[in-house]
Structure formats: C-alpha cells, structure tokens
Amino acid sequence: MTQAISPTWYRIAIFAIPEDRSELAEILAKTLSLLPTDAAIQARNLPGLVNGEFPLDAARRATQALAELGLHAEAIPVDQTPHLHPCETPHHLRWPAEGLEICGLSGEVESTVAWPNVEMISVGQVPLESTMHHTDRKTTFVSAGRHHVPEGDSTARLAAGPEAWVVCREPHRVLRLDHKRFNYEGLAERKTESATANFRQFLMELVARAQDAYLTPATMAFLTAEHAQKYSFASVTELERSTLLHLLIRRSGRSAVMPSPNPTASTVPTSA
C-alpha cells in the first residue's frame, strides 16, 4: 500500500511594502483568507514573514497578487524558512584565530564556531528592562521587567542599550548578546567602565575575524558611532523582526525596501 505524502506548507516572505499599507492588507485578506483586522495587523509588521503557514495554492495566489502590485515576495517551504529561535544567550565569548569560542560559566570552552560559519551580525539599540517601584504603606521594593503601571506606582523612563544577534551556520545556531550581561575579559587592558564602549570594541573584534559575515545597516551605523537614530529600535521585537528580514534577504539574494527604525526610539536615553 502506498503511503500518502503530506502536503508541503509554506511561509510567505515579503521584501518591500507599498506606501499605502491598506493595499497590502487587502491582498493578504483576499488571497490568504485572513480576517480584515488580522490582515491589517500583519501589514503593519511587514516587510518580513507573514505570520502563519499556507498551502501552495494560497501562497502562489498571494505572491502573484503582490507581484502585480510591484512587490517582490517569495513562498518558502516551512522547513527551509530561516528562523531565530531557539536562540542561545551566552555571557562569555573568546575570539582566537580558530573561531568564536562559546564559554561556560567557569570559562571553559563549550563549543567553537569557525569564522567562515558566522553568517550574519545584527546590532541595534533597544529599550532595556524597566525598574518599577511599588509603594504599599511604608514598604517599598523593586522588581524588574516590563509591567502595566497602576495608579500610585511609578516607573523610570526606559534606558536603552545595544544588543546583538549573531547567526551561525553548519549547524544553524543563533546567539543573542546583551551588552550588560557580558564578560569582556578578552579586551584585557582595553576594557573600560562603559559596557556600551566595551560592546562596540568586542563587536569590532568579531567583525574583523568574521570577514564573510553580512552586517546589517544598523550594525554598520553602531560600529562607526553614527547618530543613534540609525541603529535604534522601538523594542526588542522590532530588532528581532529586522534581523529576520535581513536573514531572509541574505539567503534569497534579494534587496528590500526597508522601513526606518522607529524615529521615537532615538529619544530613549542610552545606557552606559
């Protein structure tokens, strides 16, 4: 007896957006059978991957309709779609000639990524976790994280700082690096009191060795100390979305019309 072959499902990558996003939302609703409100939300979060998995006929309808609008889109089999999760959050890296060493809590080398296998580096300045002070009678305590602020509570304005996503291949793995939770012992005497300055120095070392890695425009802006608006993002989610889009572009060999980072993000104070 012949075993039935499971149909292939697809993700849809959209590499550019029209000035009027309502046109994009209309196409998504019509070709992918999305509710109008869901399609409008999706359109606001593009370019990038459309949420959801679709059969081939729907994916073809969508990409053809987008092409008629002058937008390039691709239908990618789910098992071939680039992804950023699960990701690793190492706190200690070294960078000898052999490759990028990922170290454990005691400094032991757990694994090494050969420099040619560092595929992409994406850096952005994002809001850090807030610190909220709750007042209950005469007792005050502090908790970290993003929360709704009820009446009577206060929260400091979010500071911002850089983080980096490093995408590696053979095998695929993703490193997410937080400048405040990082061991800079490899900088030796060049280490400063500023975590941001140390992070920039570390990334310059990384870029100098990973010469085949693709650097996003925001990464280049951060490394050359351009105005913060050129590498600031309104949230960690926005940076992650931009990182995934650039990974899609990298692997498809296409160019894209990129939305600028949220202009309000540059008004967030920078963490030392």
Image (cartoon, helix red, strand yellow):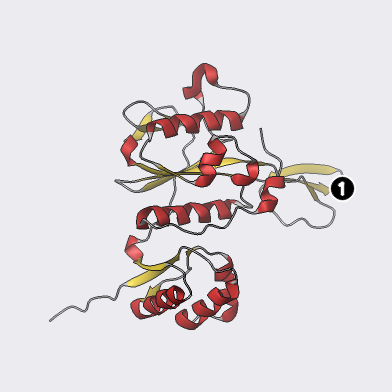
Q: Name the side, left or right, on which 79 lies relative to 188.
A: left
The residue located at (43%, 34%) in the rendering is 207
- Say above or below: 190 vs 11: above
Query: Furthest-left residue in view?
Result: 1
Which quadrant does the C terminus fall into? top right
> 264 or 9: nearer the eye?
264
Task: Give the left or right position of residue 50, taking residue 226 as reference.
Answer: left
- Image spot of residue 200 (x, y percent): 54, 32
Task: Please give the name of the residue rendered at 67% of the width and 52% of the height, measured from the top-left corner.
Answer: 263
Residue 213 lies, in percent from the top left, at: 39, 41
Q: Quadrant of the rendered structure where residue 249 is?
A: bottom left
What SS does tag 1 mark? loop
What kind of residue is marked 1? Arg
Q: Which residue in the rendered view is the most extreme toward the right?
A: 137
x, y percent for residue 79: 33, 63
Q: Is residue 49 above or below residue 23?
A: above
Q: Is residue 192 above or below residue 209?
A: above
Whether residue 128 is visible, yes or no, is no
- Report whether residue 148 is seen: yes
Image x and y of residue 19, in percent: 59, 68
Instruction: Give the quarter of the figure containing the N terminus.
Output: bottom left
Give the residue at mark 1: 137
Measuring 46% from the left and 79% from the top, which residue is drawn there?
Answer: 32
Q: How dense is the environment of label 1, judged by Cα within 10 Å: few (below 14), some, or many (20 and up)?
A: few
Name the image quarter holding residue 166.
top left
